[in-house]
Structure formats: C-alpha cells, structure tokens
C-alpha cells in the first residue's frame, strides 16, 4: 500500500541524490530508506531510481512521479495543519527559498523570532536563482520563495504577494548627486544585474522612451559576480537597491518616476499550508513596517 512514509523517502532521495543523505534528513536508518523505495517501486511496477556506484538519479518513471509525490505530501501536510489549527496547535514544515543575494531588511531577525515563537514548525531556508525558485514552488518543492521581478504577469503558475517596490539604482556614477535620469547612462559601459527578474526590460523601455542608447557591457545573474566586475572597473553597476553592494543613485524615467522592480513572495496557487500562511503574514507585516 502506497503511504506517506514511502513518498517522503522517495522525495528525499530524489532531492538529496543519495540514500544516506536522505536517511539523515528523515532521521531513519539507510536500510529503512532502501526498503521503502523498494516497496514503492514494487507497487508502481517500475524503478524510480537509476543506481550507480557514484550517484543516484531519477529513472523515467521517477521523473514523472516526483511532482505528484510532492503534491500529495503537501496536501497531507495541509490537511494535518488545518486540523491542528482548529485546536490552536502550530506545527509543520515550511520550506522558504530566497533569491541569491536578495536582502529584505530585518529578515534574519523575523525568521529567528518566528522559530522561537513556533518551535513546532520546522523552518528550512535555502537560496537559488529566480528560475530555480519558480520551478521549485511550482513543483511543491518549496512552500514560499522571496523573489524580485518586473512586470504584472507572474510566470510558472505561482501566486504572488508583493512586499515592497525595489528601486533600480546605478552604482559608480559618483559625479552625480540625487536621482539619475536614464539619459545620464548614455555612453557609459553598464554592468546589469538581471537575475531573470526583468530588470533589463524595465531599463531598456525607459531608455527607448527618451531615445537614449545604452551600452550594456555585461549582463550577469548573481550579485557577487556583478559586484566583482564593478570592482574591477568594467563599468557602472545597474542593480535593484536590495541587491546593491553599496548605496547608489535611483534611476528615473522621462516622467520623473523612479524605475523599480518588485520584491515579493511566490507560493503554489492551490497548495499552501497554514504554517506557510502564518509566515507569509509575518513577512507582509515586516514589509509594512520596514
């Protein structure tokens, strides 16, 4: 009979790519993990993993089964938490993803306070690129993810909760004081941090509206690389303020309005546990008071 512990073992091995690491994560013996996977494969009638001496990877059947297994586990967790909520009990597991390099003021303190207030809720935090975060939330591998984006349409079938507007800044035009019109970037080699959030589209649309020609020398996806290239003199750095290595000048368009992207949280459109909702509420409160 297919049950939760077998699905949990399957997802853990798939994500860790290791039976021993999965056993450590679930806190059971490796032999128990192996037995649960064998039972699952017997019930499905096909192997879910391809095992070699060096690694474990998903078999074709495992690849198609993984999203459904995550969805089933998320639904069971949500059911358990809804019942707990009626009794005033807070427990569960929240998997929070953060865009690499993103910085929301006082986030670390909020997470620490949340963990102290709700010791029955396990909080797992990881960092990844925007593309990986969208995929993980859509596949139910993450409950919530903090991302930066531009545009009104949310990709990947995820739900969006905006926390704050993040101004686009330019770092390295030290001769300029105050807001910088996008026309001031003309003729300046630019390092653009886009990180798949649409920052380039925002910048280029503003430049087109005033007939400015931009010289984007380098476009990268990680704040660390962008900062290193800026430090080595490859150009001025155009970057959302929350990801900037130091204070920059806010960029403004033809109408005098600042160019910006949005910082917010994405979640699965239909599967979100009460514990995840609880953290989402706290994060919204942090943005409101920040």
Image (cartoon, rainbow, N blue to C red):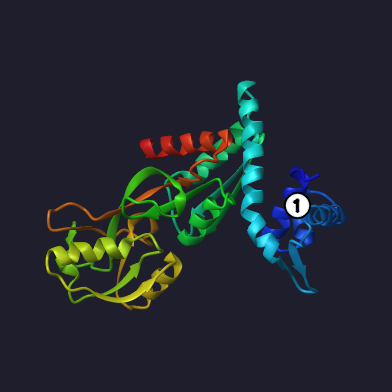
Q: In which quadrant will I find the N terminus?
A: top right
Tell me if residue 164 can be seen: yes
Picture quadrant where residue 228 is located: bottom left
- Spot occupied by residue 273 in the image (x, y as percentages of width and height): 57, 37
The residue positioned 77% from the left and 49% from the top of the image is 6
Q: Which residue is mark 1?
A: 9
Q: Nearer the viewer, residue 45 or 150?
A: 45
- How crowded pointer 1 is (Cα within 10 Å; few <14, some 14-19, many 20+) is rated as many
Instruction: Identify the residue at horizontal 56%, vertical 33% (top origin).
Output: 274
**Is the C terminus in the top left, top right, bottom left or bottom right quadrant?**
top left
Outermost residue to the top:
87
Describe residue 257's horizontal placement relative to residue 130 as left or right. left
Residue 241 position within the rendered picture, expressed as x and y whole percent measured from the top left:
33, 56
Between 121 and 224, the residue placed more toward the observer is: 121
Write the residue at 44% across / 66% down.
Answer: 222
Q: Secondary structure at mark 1?
A: helix
Figure check: 144 above or below 212: above
Q: Is residue 269 left or right of residue 139?
A: left
Q: Residue furthest front?
A: 45
Q: Is 72 located above or below residue 175 in the figure? A: above
Foreground pick, 174 / 80: 80
Can residue 170 be seen from the camera position used here?
no
Q: Name the one closer to the observer, 236 or 156.
A: 156
Q: Quadrant of residue 161?
A: top left
In the rendering, at what x and y percent does residue 266 appear? 46, 47
């Amino acid at each position: 009979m297919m049950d939760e512990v077998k699905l949990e073992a399957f997802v853990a091995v798939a994500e860790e790519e290791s039976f021993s690491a999965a056993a450590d994560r679930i806190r059971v013996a490796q032999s128990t993990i192996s037995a649960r996977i064998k039972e699952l494969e017997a019930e499905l009638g096909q192997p879910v993993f391809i095992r070699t001496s060096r690694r474990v990877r998903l078999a074709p059947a495992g690849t198609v089964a993984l999203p459904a297994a995550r969805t089933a586990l998320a639904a069971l967790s949500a059911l358990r938490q809804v019942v707990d909520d009626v009794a005033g009990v807070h427990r569960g597991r929240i998997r929070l993803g953060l865009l690499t390099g993103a910085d929301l003021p006082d986030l670390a303190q909020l997470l620490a306070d949340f963990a102290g207030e709700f010791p029955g809720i396990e909080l797992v935090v990881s960092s990844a690129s925007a593309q990986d975060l969208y995929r993980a939330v859509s596949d139910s591998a993450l409950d919530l993810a903090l991302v930066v984006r531009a545009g009104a349409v949310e990709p990947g079938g995820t739900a969006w909760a905006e926390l704050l507007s993040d101004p686009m800044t330019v770092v390295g035009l030290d001769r300029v004081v105050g807001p910088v019109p996008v026309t001031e970037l003309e003729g300046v080699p630019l390092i653009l941090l886009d990180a798949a959030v649409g920052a380039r589209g925002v910048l280029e649309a503003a430049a087109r509206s005033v007939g400015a020609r931009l010289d984007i020398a380098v476009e990268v996806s990680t704040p660390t690389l962008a900062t290193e290239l800026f430090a080595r003199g490859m150009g001025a750095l155009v970057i959302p303020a929350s990801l900037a290595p130091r204070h920059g000048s806010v960029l403004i368009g033809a109408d005098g309005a600042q160019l910006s992207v949005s910082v917010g949280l994405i979640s699965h459109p239909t599967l979100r546990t009460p514990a995840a909702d609880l953290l989402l509420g706290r994060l919204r409160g942090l943005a409101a008071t920040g």
